[in-house]
Image: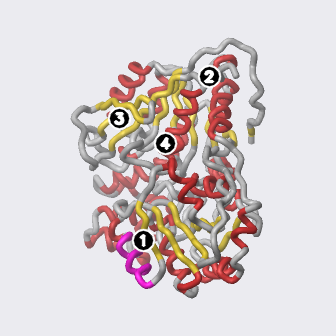
């Protein structure tokens, strides 16, 4: 895998570069990792003298916009947001390949007239976006922030809680996930029956292999699930190159036949990197920061803490309870008898202050994370971490130096790791001294600009402003 490190100044004339950054959702309504990465890249491009614009979408089912395309400015970055309520997906195919979006995307790209398109997430634009940029002759790149391009759920999780390495040859694993998703979307007796574990394998095999004999729309949707990996693989083939923020993600995409050149470029963070302030002796302060969703694993953390003496720790949980209200309510019920505080959300600018209040950050995710920004910011603020042993996180953790890992989903093992901090009150402080992450946002942005130049999207002199 190629990696870029050399950012020496090139003594060439500078030309501002117009970059259109496409992302499935964006601020101010959506504030998670991919959105944060997109905003960071745009802001750093602007600081380097370039002309970024973000193109995003309002999901079908969210509050409709007054216009099909709304324009606004966020943190100094111009944003165009399309309203998918006007072009909602009407079939399984539309969720990843919706030709009806071609005229709208073509009109937007002609208005922006970018030198480069950078896809931060293909969701809401589907496989037709790279087709449109190819037809318009616009060099296109991508950052792979999850597994949308190879996985129906984008998480590589399978029914029952296992993990997957991508579509099998017959697409049986994709069909199993499709049946489970349909039963959630339409909890009728029929879909509950065919998605039941005792029936699911047979139903998936029948649908995957004999979908031509199924009546529409069931057969049409089954065919769409089978075709999905090939359609998105072909779409990725239109990128000049794509960024993989972790070695694991790069390996998975290569193993699934991705034709795109992949370049490893780790995310960077800008945050107050001063040592943690001293604090008086007391209970260990654990913290969870992230989406209150099942695949992020806060329920595992609560279950593990129930095995520890309640006077020995506190837990702050940061995250919105509106994403999955039922799940959040269950978390509160489990947490009720423990010293746990639900703190809601906070502005990204306050991250260092939040981390300063924690002794240990816990990321008990059940899916293949990809260098989550919470992990990188914890390390940058000298906050030791405890993570699930899923690749995409463990490659940043040196056992006993800046954190510990535990087998994914193993509550007892997680409790044992947390107990180490409880039994040794000085452990978190000692580990804090050896916990660092030095890579900055500008390092990351310069990598991306170098990527454009090295893959022939623009003359090398335009890739950066004079130092």
**Residue 312's spot in the image, x, y percent?**
59, 83
Between disc 1 and disc 4, the foreground one is 4
The Cα atoms of the two marked residues, 1 and 4, are separated by: 30 Å
- Mark count: 4
For disc 1, the marked residue is: 200
Between disc 2 and disc 3, the foreground one is 3
Q: Is residue 71 above or below residue 375?
A: above
For disc 2, the marked residue is: 457
**Residue 456's spot in the image, x, y percent?**
66, 22
For disc 4, the marked residue is: 121
Query: Reading the chain from its start, which is encountered first: label 1 or label 4?
Result: 4
Furthest toward the left, the residue is: 66
* Magenta-span inclusion, residue 332: yes
Callout 2: helix, strand or loop? loop
For disc 3, the marked residue is: 81
Residue at left offset 55%, top offset 42%: 233
Span highlighted in magenta in the image: 327-337
In this picture, residue 70 sits left or right of residue 380: left
Q: Of residues 238 and 249, which is closer to you in this image?
A: 249
Residue at left offset 69%, top offset 70%: 428
Is residue 297 in view from this perspective? yes
The Cα atoms of the two marked residues, 2 and 1, are separated by: 47 Å
Give neighbour class at mark 1: few <14, some 14-19, many 20+ (Cα, 10 Å): many
* Magenta-span inclusion, residue 348: no
């Amino acid at each position: 895998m190629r990696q870029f490190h050399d950012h020496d100044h090139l003594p060439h004339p500078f030309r501002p570069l117009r970059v259109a950054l496409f992302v499935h959702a964006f601020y101010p309504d959506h504030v998670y990792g991919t959105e944060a990465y997109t905003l960071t890249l745009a802001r750093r491009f602007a600081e380097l003298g370039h002309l970024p614009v973000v193109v995003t979408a309002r999901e079908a089912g969210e509050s409709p916009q007054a216009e099909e395309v709304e324009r606004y400015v966020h943190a100094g970055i111009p944003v165009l947001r399309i309203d998918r309520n006007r072009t909602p997906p009407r079939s399984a195919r539309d969720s990843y390949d919706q030709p009806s979006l071609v005229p709208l995307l073509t009109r937007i790209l002609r208005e922006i007239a970018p030198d480069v398109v950078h896809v931060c997430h293909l969701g809401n634009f589907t496989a037709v976006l790279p087709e449109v940029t190819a037809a318009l002759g616009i060099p296109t790149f991508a950052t792979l922030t999850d597994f949308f391009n190879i996985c129906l759920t984008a998480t590589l999780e399978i029914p029952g809680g296992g993990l997957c390495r991508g579509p099998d040859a017959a697409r049986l694993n994709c069909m199993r996930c499709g049946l489970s998703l349909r039963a959630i979307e339409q909890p009728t007796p029929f879909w509950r029956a065919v998605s039941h574990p005792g029936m699911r394998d047979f139903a998936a095999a029948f649908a995957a292999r004999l979908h031509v004999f199924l009546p529409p729309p069931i057969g049409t949707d089954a065919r769409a699930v089978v075709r999905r990996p090939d359609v998105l693989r072909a779409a990725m083939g239109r990128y000049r190159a794509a960024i993989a923020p972790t070695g694991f993600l790069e390996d998975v995409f290569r193993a699934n036949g991705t034709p795109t050149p992949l370049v490893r470029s780790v995310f960077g963070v800008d945050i107050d990197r001063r040592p943690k302030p001293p604090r008086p002796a007391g209970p260990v302060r654990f913290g969870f920061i992230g989406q209150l969703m099942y695949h992020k694993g806060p329920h595992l953390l609560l279950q593990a803490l129930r095995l520890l003496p309640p006077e020995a720790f506190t837990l702050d949980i940061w995250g919105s309870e509106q994403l999955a209200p039922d799940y959040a309510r269950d978390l509160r019920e489990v947490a009720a008898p423990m010293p746990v505080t639900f703190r809601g959300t906070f502005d990204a600018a306050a991250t260092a202050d939040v981390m300063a209040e924690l002794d240990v950050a816990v990321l008990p995710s059940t899916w293949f994370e990809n260098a989550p920004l919470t992990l990188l910011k914890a390390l940058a603020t000298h906050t030791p971490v405890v993570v699930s042993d899923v690749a995409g996180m463990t490659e940043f953790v040196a056992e006993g130096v800046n954190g510990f890992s535990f087998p994914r989903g193993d509550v007892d093992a997680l409790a044992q790791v947390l107990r180490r901090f409880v039994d040794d009150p000085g452990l978190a402080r000692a580990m804090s001294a050896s916990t660092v992450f030095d890579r900055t946002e500008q390092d990351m942005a310069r990598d991306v600009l170098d990527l454009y130049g090295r893959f022939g999207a623009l003359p090398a002199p335009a890739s950066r402003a004079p130092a």
